[in-house]
Image (cartoon, rainbow, N blue to C red):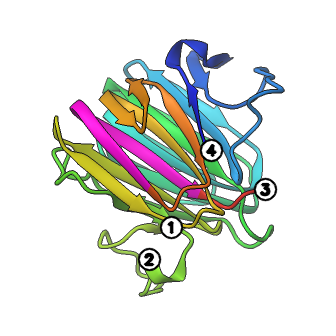
């Protein structure tokens, strides 16, 4: 089953100088139809002007992944060192038992980003931060795992985090990226019991009979293989989460 959310139907909420476009209910945007997708609680688009800052907090429990589409961000979480995130890179904070303050400040060129909040399998624990440098924006057309709570995706657990693998979520979820050339496709295998949520960052794609353009999203349930075809060069992000 595929349910399409078109970009012009997204909710809007204001935070500081930032206008967030929301796929699910968030802050003062209340939407009884679009509450969440399985264990994916929040998906927001944001765009900051030069040196503008987006503030959150206090926050607890959620795994928050911020992926930078254009520009750059400096992530600052109370108790952690600042992280400089360039286009194509991501910042991750697992809020655990609680973070008093979180902020993301755009660089001199501003920034556009997508932010995903996952519900962890277990609450509590010490907050934890990770970041990853930018991906190859051209890509090879396949899906790359940006973040994962599956042990098989995070084979080497170490206190010394490197840029070699996905960030380690506390949620049994994956966040994936694909840059698909025009006329080609990307396939992702999962279990029919999982919930998938795909958002088109740029370009135009088709999923079965549905056509999605920039900013559109699709909730997909009951499939073992998801195939996405690019009608024009496209960048997509995909979440694979447990049903709630």
Q: Which residue in the structure is indicated by mark 2?
A: 153
Q: In the picture, which quadrant includes the C terminus?
A: bottom right
Instruction: Report the residue at 47% width, 26% height from top.
Output: 216
Residue 148: image tag: 1
**Other-residue count near label 4 (Cα within 10 Å), few / some / many at <14 / 14–19 / ≥20:** some
Residue 134, numbered label: none
- Marks 2 & 4, CB-CB < 8 Å contact: no
In the image, residue 144 lies at what x, y percent? Answer: 32, 60
Disc nearer the start of the sequence (4/1): 4
Q: Position of residue 116 (x, y in %)?
A: 57, 45
Q: Residue furthest right?
A: 32
Question: Is residue 167 within the magenta segment?
Answer: no
Q: Earlier in the sequence, mark 2 or mark 3?
A: 2
Measure how far apart labels 4 and 3 are at the Cα level.
27 Å
Front disc: 2 or 4 = 2
In space, the residues marked 4 and 1 are separated at their CA atoms by: 22 Å
Element at label 1: strand
């Amino acid at each position: 089953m595929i349910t399409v959310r078109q970009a012009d139907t997204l909710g809007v909420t204001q935070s500081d100088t930032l206008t967030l476009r929301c796929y699910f209910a968030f802050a003062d945007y209340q939407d009884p139809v679009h509450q969440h997708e399985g264990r994916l609680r929040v998906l927001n688009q944001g765009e900051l002007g030069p040196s503008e800052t987006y503030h959150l907090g206090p926050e607890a429990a959620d795994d928050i992944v911020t992926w930078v589409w254009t520009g750059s961000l400096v992530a600052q979480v109370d108790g952690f060192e600042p992280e400089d995130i360039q286009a194509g890179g991501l910042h991750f904070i697992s809020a655990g038992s609680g973070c008093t303050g979180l902020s993301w400040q755009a660089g001199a060129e501003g920034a556009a980003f997508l932010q995903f909040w996952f519900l962890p399998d277990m609450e509590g624990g010490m907050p934890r931060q990770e970041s990853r440098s930018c991906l190859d924006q051209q890509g090879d057309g396949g899906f790359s795992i940006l973040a994962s709570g599956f042990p098989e995706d995070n084979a080497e657990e170490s206190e010394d985090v490197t840029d070699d693998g996905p960030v380690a979520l506390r949620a049994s979820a994956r966040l994936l990226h694909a840059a698909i050339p025009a006329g080609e496709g990307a396939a992702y295998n999962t279990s029919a019991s999982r919930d998938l949520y795909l958002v088109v960052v740029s370009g135009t794609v088709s999923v079965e009979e549905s056509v999605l353009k920039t900013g559109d999203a699709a909730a997909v349930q009951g499939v073992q293989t998801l195939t996405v075809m690019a009608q024009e060069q496209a960048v997509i992000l995909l979440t694979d989460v447990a049903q709630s």
